[in-house]
Image (cartoon, rainbow, N blue to C red):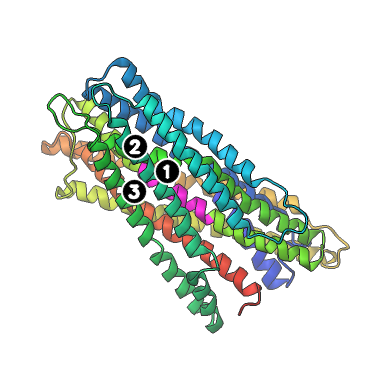
Amino acid sequence: GGGIFTKAADVGADLVGKIEANIPEDDPRNPAVIADLVGDNVGDCAARGADLFESIAAEIISAMILGATMAKKSNLTDQEMTGFMMFPLVVHCMDLVVSGIGIISVARDAPPGTPPEDPLEVMKKGYMVTLSLAVVGFGVACYTMLNVASVPGAWIYFFGCGMIGMLSAYLFVWISQYYTDYKYKPVRQVAEASTTGHGTNVIAGVALGMESTAMPVLVISIAIISAYWCGKMSGLTDQYGAPCGGLFGTAVATMGMLSTAAYVLAMDIFGPIADNAGGIVEMSQQPAQVRDITDQLDSVGNTTKATTKGFAIGSAALASFLLFSAYMDEVSSFTGKPFVTVDIAVPEVFVGGLLGSMLVYLFSAWACKAVGKSAQEVVEEVRRQFLERPGIMTYLEKPDHARCVSIVAASALREMTAPGLLAVSMPIVVGVTFRQVGLATGQVNLGPQVVAGFLMFATVAGILMALFLNTAGGAWDNAKKYVETGAL
């Protein structure tokens, strides 16, 4: 709902204000300007925080399940099992401490006469402080909580898994900056495509979004495989002598990636703060040089927002792999039968995968339609106020900003109902339906297998769709900022 709110208000305000009424962005005469500024907080602060909270909560729960399962298989002592179970909670407590120190390292007053610094570079320095402290804290946590008497060197391999996750987090930050900052070639190519018309701009932006999925997927793929094998080499084995630390190694990599989540979330919230600061500058009619400063901050904010979204997508991808493994463990425990593989050559399982992929596109379509419907209501309201109150344009009358805020809020909540119900109900419907099919055809375990295929394909399609939409949107936004600098 937060995303629908912010985009509907943004689209509605700009379509009428900038295009039809020919007034600047964030002009106080625009009845939807406050809704636009509120939307930045709703969508980019609250919604992203909820997204990362979900990823962290899912990772903690799945890591605790996998840690307890592995410790039981390895016949560890109760004290050692407790260490593996509590490890995720300790890591995220450490995240709050190291991220706080990183934020403090950035929050300082520059001495008088200091030349202006690139805001993004300043934040990246703070991120490096946070990341460095996280490496030290992670190593201490691994040594104290994952030290197994029967396999003394196991904690070192799990520490290596954490380093894989941290490296992945850094690469996600760098990749997002490369594709969304106008200092680099991709965004400039989109801006240059605008010189030949709207169509070439759209083509270049879509192509950039599609291209931007490649590097993150490679990073995720290498991280999952590397962490799995690093965990498997830890030396922990089950009662049959088979290595059993692979899945927990992947869990530790996810914890490593999310060990700086608080700082990355702070970088994300920088975006809407800078955006709203620019709006306040415009509404209070400050000098042009002040707006130039806030525009630069806004451009950096677009990059940090895209960075956080990419970080959230990557962490969600790793966390979903853990949840998928935890799901298979739970099915095995519930049915009393081993459930270690999902055979997509079974027609019903393959169909479940198709339905999972379809869910991603159908959900995205309904979400886009919801934004369009909400934006139409805002457009109609802004047009009505301009028509019925001509004094708004001459500052003789005040626009009804509250009316637009209430329209967007009500519309966003109403329009999110269908996509939300779709995402929640479809896995249940698929599982129950194919369970009955399995009982009718003698395939007792068909329902869980189809749901596993459904989740697997939905995760893959969702990761690619999210990366495409996130990066293309950020690149288009900063291509506009690049044009506004007068570079073209």
Q: CA distance from mark 2 to mark 3?
A: 17 Å
Q: Earlier in the sequence, mark 1 or mark 2?
A: 2
Q: Residue 193, position in %: x, y?
A: 51, 79
Q: Which residue is mark 1?
A: 257
Name which residue type carries label 1. Answer: Met
Q: Which residue corresponds to the image point at 44% horizontal and 28% vertical from the top-left?
A: 89
Question: Which mark is in front, 1 or 3?
Answer: 1
According to the image, label 3 marks what residue? 459
In the image, which residues are magenta? 306-319
Question: Which corner quadrant of the image does residue 97 belong to?
Answer: top right
In the rendered image, the quadrant that contains the C terminus is bottom right
Q: Earlier in the sequence, mark 2 or mark 3?
A: 2
| Dot 1 crowding, Cα within 10 Å, few <14, some 14–19, many 20+ | many
| Residue 323 appearing in the image | no
Look at 46% across and 47% down and name the residue there: 312
Is there CB contact under 8 Å for labels 1 and 2?
no
Give the Cα separation between the discs numbered 1 and 3: 18 Å
**Relative image position of residue 461 (x, y in whole percent):** 34, 54
Q: CA distance from mark 1 to mark 2?
A: 10 Å
Q: Secondary structure at mark 1?
A: helix
Q: Is residue 106 left or right of residue 213?
A: right
Q: Quadrant of residue 455?
A: top left
x, y percent for residue 130: 53, 42
Q: State whether residue 11 is above or below residue 221.
A: below
Q: Is residue 278 left or right of residue 176?
A: right
Label 2: state its secondary structure.
helix
Give the residue type at disc 2: Ala
Q: Is residue 338 above or below residue 373?
A: above
Q: Which residue is mark 2?
A: 251
